[in-house]
Image: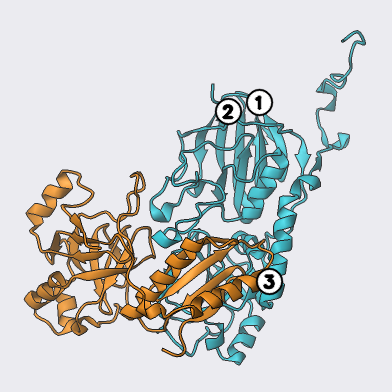
Chain colours: A cyan, B orange
Amino acid sequence: MTATLTVLQCGPGVTVQDQGRPGYLAYGLSRGGATDLLALAEGAALLGQSPELAAIEMAGMGGVFDVSEDVVIALTGALMKADCDGTALRWNASHMVPKGSRLTIGAAREGVYGYLHVAGGVDAANRLGARSAHLAAGIGKPVKAGDMLAIGSEAGSAQAGLKLDPDARLSGGMVRIVPSLQTASFASEELTRFEATGFKRDPRGNRMGVQMTPEGPGFESREGLSVLSEIIVPGDVQITGNGTPFVLMSECQTTGGYPRIGSVLACDMPKVAQAQPGTEIRFQFVSLEEGRDLVLRALREWAGLGKRCTPLVRDPHDIPDLLSYQLISGAIAGDET
Amino acid sequence: MPNWPELCTIGTNGLLIRFGDQLSEPANRAALAFRAAVEREGWSGVEETSTSLVSAYLRVDPAFPDMDALEARTLALMASRDWFAEPLPEGRRLWRVPTVYGTDLAPQLEEAADVAGLSVAEAIATISGTQVRVQTIGFAPGQPYLGALPEAWNIPRQTALTDKVPIGALTVAIRQLTLFSVSTPTGWRHVGQTGFRAFRPDADDPFVLRPGDEVLFQETTPEQYHRYQDAGDPDGGAVAEQIA
């Protein structure tokens, strides 16, 4: 029988996400997929499974879940308070959630997008080659209370009790960009000022794009708003009519006519995604060659995250009910064959 | 056109081949033909291609070892022929899409006609009488940009956005029409309403229109429109015939 994850409660920004739906740009459909792809890779590493499997993305707020069978889960991305039947669960780790117990995930304390991964992946309907919801395109729906999500049957060797120290990315900071289609139409003083400016991640932000409000005046290109509509890629920083930059995220539109001042490196997009409203972000230009090299190195690191997972060892002092544990359960009688 | 095409990069792993900085029929055709040529050749390292109005885009595998060679190959293909003289794609169709002009279904017809300096009757006649071509699919899934309308329709977008137009809304600006495939805010003026769904996520062919297809937005009555809607017809009464 297929194991299921039942949603008892959840926040408004919860969706099933995977690496997205490539191949449909020519038809006006952006790739979409997890906003923090590194968090997706981290969960896959903790569970020893393919990063192509789908997980549950939780924007700002988690939910309450129970499972129909024993299931190994992993928690990554934005730091959220989590417990299983009242026992606190470490974030960035894998855990066993026994059948019938209740998993509770609270609000994000740091970062925006938290991820709940299950061994075997979330087996949502495959539409156009992916399981991820693309709400802007009308593909899939938000996860809501009462949903029963099927868990994939390819649970391999998932192991509870692993942890991974994640790359720091939840509190903003420097984001690297390469020149983009209209960078040259900004005066060099504008580009210098862009790099010297601190931006606050605006509350206006979602899976399509995030506004970055400058501490000073906005930015102006020489072409103004007369740019002919061209392809948009996630990471593009478009300067809208009032001079405010928007970083375009995974679910962005496929074409647009606002000038693009630069494009955020794919490896720095998790930092943009995870910046809570009010968090400071700065942009720094790197050359195209350097940018390509940085992305390539990051992708290799993401693919090798499994090697960085280590056993979750608990300090006995942190276990309040130590004496109630069956501490000799690993002992054997000696006559086993 | 001595300066075109030109090659630019977008992001760290995108190549953009531009055939102009203004929309023109030859540049649009050139972009479609260039993309088709790259698809035919099946270049190693290129994971996906698409076109916008006058440019073609190649998305390259970030792990592809030799971007320089790929750029050289792109430049060689750009120089290999006069792309502006290439024909339109094959397999094109003419769609006749029943459209309600004005009424409460498309409330900005009068305003748009006014901006274009036309009477409402002239506005309907010029839009419904022009066989427009799908120049690109973009912004939202399956959503076509069509043109070109007569010069009178070179009107700007609104400065303020309309909160939401429904699926099937026919909107106008800068001598182009857009037929919305999703319900979304827009700066384009809503002059007609169709029952045509340009994106059908659960259908075998979810994206109905192709660049190069041509469309006549023929006038119909609200009563007929509602009959198509009530029947659940995703074509909204539209019919297609092969033209090339």
Image: A102 above or below B186: above
The answer to whether any part of residue A298 appears in the image is: yes
Q: Chain of mark 3?
A: A
**Residue at the extreme top:** A335
> Which corner quadrant of the image does residue A193 belong to?
bottom right
Mark before the other along the chain sequence, 2 or 1: 2
Q: Chain of mark 1?
A: A
> Which corner quadrant of the image does residue B10 belong to?
bottom right
Left/right of residue B72 with respect to residue B101 in the rendered view: right
Residue found 69% across the figure and 64% down from its top: B65
Instruction: For label 2, count other residues whose C-alpha is less than 10 Å away and answer few (under 14), some (14-19) or many (20+).
Output: many
Mark 3: secondary structure: helix
- Give the image location of residue B206, x and y in percent: 35, 50
Reading the image, the residue beneath label 1 is A98
Looking at this view, is A112 or A39 the one in front? A39
Distance Cα–Cα, label 2 vs label 1: 7 Å
Reading the image, the residue beneath label 2 is A67
- Give the image location of residue B128, x and y in percent: 13, 69
Give the amino acid type for the residue marked by disc 3 in the picture: Gly
